[in-house]
Amino acid sequence: MSLNFRYMPLLAGQLGVEFFDEKLNSLCMTWLVDHVYAIREAATLNLKKLVEKFGPDWAQNTVIPKVLAMSRDQNYLHRMTCLFCINVSCIISTL
């Protein structure tokens, strides 16, 4: 993975929400279902920072549906990642 997680929110802020949603959002969501736990964990914290940057409306329309869809996945790791996202409160404040 060539793009460091900690730079994603900074990059997203520089490029704007439209560019992020079009080009980078799917990459961030893909990290949430990675096979490696450390990547899923970092992606969860990354998602929290992105929600803080783009706000609750963006989270409600863009992030929450995808995270909640993970709760119905057959793979228990994906369901657990959904819980981790909620645990770090990346979506609780927007519900």
Image (cartoon, rainbow, N blue to C red):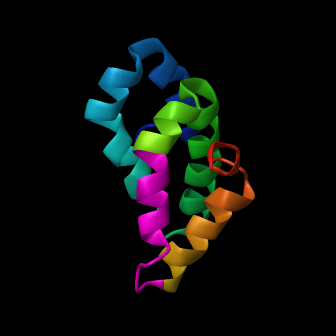
Where's residue 47, x and y in %? 56, 44
Counting labels gives 0
Is residue 6 placed above or below 80 in the rendered structure?
above
Q: Name the one closer to the observer, 65 or 7.
A: 65
**What segment is highlighted magenta in the picture?**
62-75
Q: Is residue 46 left or right of residue 62?
A: right
Q: Is residue 66 magenta?
A: yes
Q: Is residue 23 left or right of residue 59?
A: left
Residue depicted at 51% across the width and 32% down the height = 57
Residue depicted at 66% across the width and 59% down the height = 86
What main secondary structure does the magenta stretch of the protein show? Answer: helix
Is residue 4 in view from this perspective? no
Residue depicted at 54% across the width and 40% down the height = 5
Q: Name the one closer to the observer, 54 or 61.
A: 61
Is residue 45 in view from this perspective? yes
Where's residue 32, x and y in %? 48, 59
Is residue 10 placed above or below 92 in the rendered structure?
above
**Image quadrant in which you'd find residue 25:** top left
Q: Is residue 65 magenta?
A: yes
Q: Name the one closer to the observer, 37 or 30.
A: 30
Where's residue 85, x and y in %? 63, 58
Where's residue 11, x and y in %? 47, 22
Residue depicted at 73% across the width and 60% down the height = 87
